[in-house]
Amino acid sequence: MDSCSLISVADLPAPFRFAFCFRYFNSLQSECFPVCFLSDVNVVVSAPTGSGKTVLFELCILRLLSRFLSYEGKFNHQKGTLKTIYIAPSKALVQEKLRDWNMKFNTWVINCLEMTGDNETYNLKNVHDADIILTTPEKFDSVTRHGIRDGGLSFFSDIALVLIDEVHLLNDPRGAALEAIVSRIKMLSRSSDMKSSPLANVRLLAVSATIPNIEDLAEWLLVPAEGIKRFGEEMRPVKLVTKVFGYAPAKNDFLFERRLQSFIFDILMQHSRGKSALVFCSTRKGAQAAAQQLSQIAVSLGPSNPFIKSKLQQEKLKEASLSCSDKQMQSCILTGVGYHNGGLCMKDRNLVEGLFLKGDIQILCTTNTLAHGINLPAHTVVIKSTQYFNKEKGLYLEYERSMVLQMCGRAGRPPFDDTGTVIIMTRKETVHLYENLLNGCEMVESQLLSCAIEHLNAEIVQLTVSDISLAIEWLKCSYLYVRIKKNPENYGVKRGIPCERLEKHMRDICVQKINELAEYGMIWTDEDAFLLKPLEPGKLMTKFYLKFGTMKDIVTAPGSCSLEDALHVVCRSEEIAWIQLRRNEKKLLNDINSDKEGRLRFHVIGENSKRKKRIQTREEKIFVLANDCLTGDPSIRDLSLNQDMNSICSNGCRIARCMKECFIYKKSYKGAVNSTLLAKSLRQRLWDCSPYLLKQLPGIGMVTAKALHSAGINSFRTLAEADPRKIEILTGRKYPFGNHIKESLLSLPPTLEMQIEEAECKVQGKSKITVKLTRMPRQISSSKQHYADMTVGSEEDNMILFHEKIRAEEFPSPYVVTVLVACPLHGKVTVKADLIFDEYVGLDVHEKHVVSRDIYPIRNATLVNEETPTNYSAPKEMYIVEDGNNMSSYAAANDVTHDLNNTNKPLHSSVPSFELLDEETDIYLQEPGEAEPKVKTEEMIFDHIRKKSKNFPTLVTSKEAMDCSYEPLILRSPIRTTKMSHFKADAYDYDFYGDDVILVDPTPPPPPPPPPPEASSSSSFFFDEQCYHTSKYRSFDNIVNSKPFSKPQGSVIRVSPLESDPDSRGPPTPSTHKEVGFLGFKSVFSFL
C-alpha cells in the first residue's frame, strides 16, 4: 500500500481521535482498518514484530466502544456491560499494555484490570466493573475453571471481544492453556443460555509473528477470508542487519554459556556503536551473571567506562540505585548496566525499565520475558546462545524459531534508528539454522493432547461438558481438531486414514480420558458412561490447577498420611517433574542428607532403614532440598539449586493445600492436619519446630534470628517477654530497633486458648465433648485479617468430627463446639483439637482429651431390641460370690478391692456382668418421657436375656491380646434366707494355654471326656461341661442354655491358664458345699 492510500486518524469518530498521537496509520494498519474498525468479523494477522500490530487491538476496542456513541456523537458509557479480554503470553507484556491503555482510555473512564499472578488484589466486583481485562492464558484458565454457570463468573456472558497477542504461543507447551480457554469461549458462545448475551456474538482477533499456516488458525477461530491478513518483512519499519557467530562447543551446555559471556563486551563495542543494547540470556542466573561481568569490566576501565556518557547520567544512576532493593542490581546500575527477569520485584522491574527507556542504562541483560513484546526496543540485540533449558524434558534445546524472531524484533527503534542490528551467538554446527531466519518460522501445532485430561475435567467441573456428546463437541472446538486432520502423524495417527476413522479416533480419545477420570473418582458417570458429573476430587484438581498424575497420588494417599508421607507426595508431583538431578550436585546433596549436625527433620532412607549415602533420583533430590530449606537456614547457596528450591516451595504449597481439602472431604483427620501443616511450612519455608521462627517477622533476617536464638529467644512468646534493650544488645543494633521488633508482634494474630471438656451425655454409647475457643484480650488489635483451620478429630479411627475456617479477630468469643464421640466398651478414644493458622508457623494450638468409659447404664426398654456389637477381653477367673459379710479367703489373699456387699457400685469388668435379683423384687425400666416407670414381667425379662445373650462377642485370650487390666467375672447371688459364706474350689485345672480361645461362637465340638466323679452329684447350678472341657468351641449363649453340670455344693469355678505341666491334671478339691439355684432367680444382664 503506498503512502497515498494511508488512512488518516481523522477518519475516526471525533471522541476517538485522541487515542492516537500520530496523524496517519501505517501501511499495515491502514490495510487492516476496514476489517478491524468498520466490521465485526473475526480477524487473524501475521506480521513481523515491530510492525504496529498493537494498533489493531486498539481499533477493535474502539469499534466495541462505538456502541456507546449516540447519534449526536456523545459517548454514553455503561460500565462493565461490554468486556474485552486481552490475552498475552507474559506478565510483563500484560503490565506494559495495562500502563498504556490506562493512559489512552482514561478519557472515556474505561476501567482496565490486570489479572495475573502479580495482582491478586482484585475481587468479584472489580471483575464485574472492568471493561478491559488483561491476563495471561494460565491465569484466565484458572479463574474461569469454575463458577461460570452458577453465577460466580457471570461476567463471562458480558465478554464481547477477545484479543490474543502472540497467538503462535500455541506451539509452546504453555499453548494448551490458550487453546483450552478459546475453546471454552467458543463452546459457551453456542450455548442456548447465552443467546441474548454479548458472548453469543463474541469477536476474536489474533495476531502473530510470521507463520506459514495462518489458514489453520483462521479455521480454528472461524475467520472469514476477508479477515485473514498476512504480511512479510517488507512491513518492518526498521530494516534489520543480522549476524550469526559460531563458537566451538564446550564440555557441557553450562560451560558453553559461561564461555560466551567473555565475548559479549567486545561484540557490544564493535556493533552497538555506543547505542542501547539488549542481551538475551536463557536463564535468570545467566542474565544476572552477564550484567555483573559487564559491570566489572566497566569499573576496571574507570573514567573510560563506555556505558556512562555524562555526569548528569551518573548522578541519575546514583539516585536510582538508592531506591533499588536488589543489592546486586545497585552495583550494576552505577556502571550503566542492568538486568531484568521475573525474579525481581515489581518495583525493581519498573525502575530498570524506566532507566532503560530514558537511556540512563545503556546495556540491559534479560531473559526471553522481554522478547514477548514488552516495549523496550534497542538499537542492538545480542542473543547469547540459542539454547534454553526445557523444564519438562530436562534438556537444553534450541529455541523455537518464533522465539528467536521475537528477540530479533526488539532491535531497531523506529523514532531513533533507520536500522537495527541482531547478533546471534550459537554453536558452529547450528549457524546455518539462523542465517535465513527472517524468512519465517515453523508450523504452529497444537499442544493440547498431552494435557487433554486436565482441561476436559475442567470443562466437566464447570458444567460446560455434561455428557459424552458435549465432550466430543468440545474437542472439535479445539485447534487440535484442526491440526490432527492436517498432520495426523504428529499426534500418533497414521496419515491417509479416512475422515470417518479420524472422527472415531477423536471419540476414542474422549472416552479414554473420561474413563481415567472416573476410575480415580474425579467424575461420576452413569451406567452407560454417557452422563458426566463432577465429584469433589475433580473439583479440587481444577481449583488448584494440578496435573492428573499428581491428583492420582493425592487421591490414593492413605488417610493416616504422616507429614513425611505428604512431603513425598509433593516430591513425586508432575508440577516439579522438570527438576533434574545433575551430576555436579550429587556430592552436595549426599553431604546434606548425611546430616552430621542433626539439622534435617526427615532424611532419604535406603532399603536397610538407614540414611542413604548416595542420592540417585530426582525425587530424592527434591526431598533433600525441601528438608534443607524447611530448616529455616538452608545450607545451599547455589543459584540454580535455589531456583529449584523456590519452585518446590511454591508448587508444593499449592499441592499440599489440595491434599488438605481432599483429606477434609474424606474426613481423614491425620492426613488433613499433616497436609495443612505442610502447606504452611512450605509457604513460610520453616518447619514448626525450627529454631528460626522469628524470621517471619518484618525486620528479622537470618543473622538477627540466629543472634536471638543463641540467647534463648526463639519463639514469639520469648520475644514478647524480652526487653527491647536486651534485643538491641544481642543483635548489635541501635535504639529503637528493639522497640520496632516488639511492635512487629502486633502483626501476629491474637492469642487463642482452647479447652476440651467432657460433658454429660444422655445418648447411649456416646460421650459429649465440648471444645471451647477463647480469644485473649489485647490492647492494640491488628488491622490484618488472620484465618485459621479449626479441626476436631478422633485419633483411633482417624475421623474428622468437626472442621471450620475461622477468622481469628472476628469469631464470637468464647466459641463452643460440641461433638458426640462413640466410645467402645472398656476402650478409649483420644479426641484431638487443632487450631492451625494459615500464615504464621509456631502459633498453632493443639489439645487432646482421652475419653474412656467402663460400663454402660441399664438400657431403656426402647433400646432392648438393639444389637450393639461390643469388644470384650476374656477374664482369667470366674467367681460365684454369695452376698454376705464373710470375705472369701481367696479374695482376701489376692487383695480383691471391690465392695461385694455394695451392689449399687459399678463393677468394672471386661465381660458382661450378671445381677441376680431377688425373686420377689420387681424390675422397673422407665420409658423415655414417662413420669412413672412401668413394671416389667418375668417373661419380658427373660425375653430381654435371650436377645442379649445372642450378642455375646467372640472372646480371645492370648499372650498378645490379653489386657493386663482385666478383672474377673463375678456372678452375684443375693440370698436372703441364710448368712452368706464365701468359698472357693478349684475346678479342673484344664490346660488353657495363652493362645487358647476361651469363649467363641458355637461350632460343633468334639465329644467331651466323661465328667469326674465329683461332678456326678446333682446340683441346680447349670454349667456346660462341653464348654468347660472344650471351651474354645462354645459361647455364653450355649452355656446359659446347656444342661446342668453337677458340682460340689457352693463351689466356685475358676478357669485360668495352667502354669504347671498340662499332664498334671486332677479333680478339684471342693471346699464348703452349698447349693446355688441359678435359674431360680430373675436375672438382668447389665452390659458393658
Image (cartoon, helix red, strand yellow):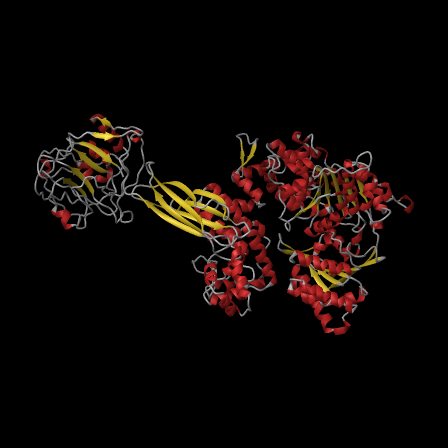
Given residues 846 and 376, the one toward you in this image is: 846
Q: Is residue 697 above or below residue 197?
A: below
| Residue drawn at point x = 84 percent, y = 58 percent | 417
Quarter-of-image position of residue 57: top right
Q: Is residue 87 visible?
A: yes
| Residue drawn at point x = 77 percent, y = 60 percent | 358
Residue found at the very far right of the displayed protein: 4
Q: Whole-percent x and y of residue 13? A: 83, 40
Residue 919 relative to residue 630: left or right: left
Q: Whole-percent x and y of residue 976? A: 11, 35
Q: Whole-percent x and y of residue 437? A: 78, 54
Quarter-of-image position of residue 391: bottom right
Q: Is residue 553 visible?
A: no
Residue 986 relative to residue 728: left or right: left
Q: Whole-percent x and y of residue 427? A: 72, 61
Residue 520 relative to residue 202: left or right: left
| Quarter of the rendering occupied by the N terminus | top right
